[in-house]
Image: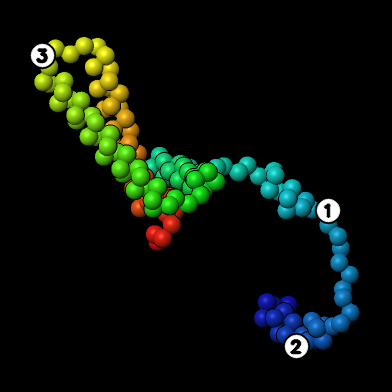
């Protein structure tokens, strides 16, 4: 029998009822591993990331954790609190500059005057840097200020 005859016989003996029969055909159960077993057996290699992609993932994780921690501790800032901080920074700057000018007017400065100048400078710098960081956090939407969208 040729291949052409087999094809003709299979078409002529085709019965749609056999395909759509309500009576299910018996199924033989085969002892095959489950999909979970195959996954456990397969060696899964972690994807290889570039250093830049990994650094970006770290940055995103840091930002997410920062937002979560800030939201849990700071909640919402009132505009008056920021204005008070601005006034404190301006006052600290004025005190530092005044002490600096006073020191330049004296022919010699003692250790106590230098320590006071250092303390005033550190206070001014902390407030100034804090305001700069607060401003950036506001722009990055890491903090919420009442009445500011």
Q: Position of residue 110 (x, y in %)?
A: 21, 11
Q: Which label number is shown at residue 53? A: none
Picture quadrant where residue 18 is located: bottom right
Q: Which residue has dot 1 on it?
A: 31
- Rounded to the nearest whole Å, what is the CA distance between mark 1 and mark 3? 98 Å
Q: Position of residue 135 (x, y in %)?
A: 33, 48
Q: Residue at x 16, y 23 (%)?
A: 102
User: Is residue 49 something one can see in this rendering?
Assistant: no
Q: Residue at x 86, y 63 (%)?
A: 28
Q: Residues within 10 Å of mark 2 (few under 14, many from 20)?
A: few
Residue 115, placed above or below residue 38 = above
Picture quadrant where residue 87 is located: top left
Q: Quadrant of the C terminus?
A: bottom left
Q: Which residue has dot 2 on it?
A: 12
Residue 65 or 104: which is nearer the viewer?
Answer: 104
Q: Residue at x 68, y 48 (%)?
A: 39
- Rounded to the nearest whole Å, what is the CA distance between mark 1 and mark 2? 36 Å
């Amino acid at each position: 029998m040729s291949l052409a005859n087999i094809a003709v016989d299979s078409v002529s003996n085709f019965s749609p009822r056999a395909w759509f029969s309500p009576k299910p055909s018996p199924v033989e159960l085969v002892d095959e591993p489950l999909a979970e077993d195959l996954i456990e057996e397969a060696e899964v290699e972690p994807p290889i990331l570039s250093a830049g992609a990994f650094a970006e993932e770290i940055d995103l994780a840091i930002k997410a954790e920062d937002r979560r921690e800030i939201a849990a501790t700071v909640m919402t800032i009132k505009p008056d609190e920021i204005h008070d901080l601005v006034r404190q920074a301006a006052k600290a700057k004025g005190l530092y500059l005044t002490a600096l000018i006073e020191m330049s007017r004296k022919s010699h400065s003692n250790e106590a005057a230098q320590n006071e100048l250092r303390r005033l400078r550190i206070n001014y710098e902390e407030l100034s840097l804090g305001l700069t960081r607060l401003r950036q956090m506001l722009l990055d939407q890491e903090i919420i200020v009442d009445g500011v969208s």
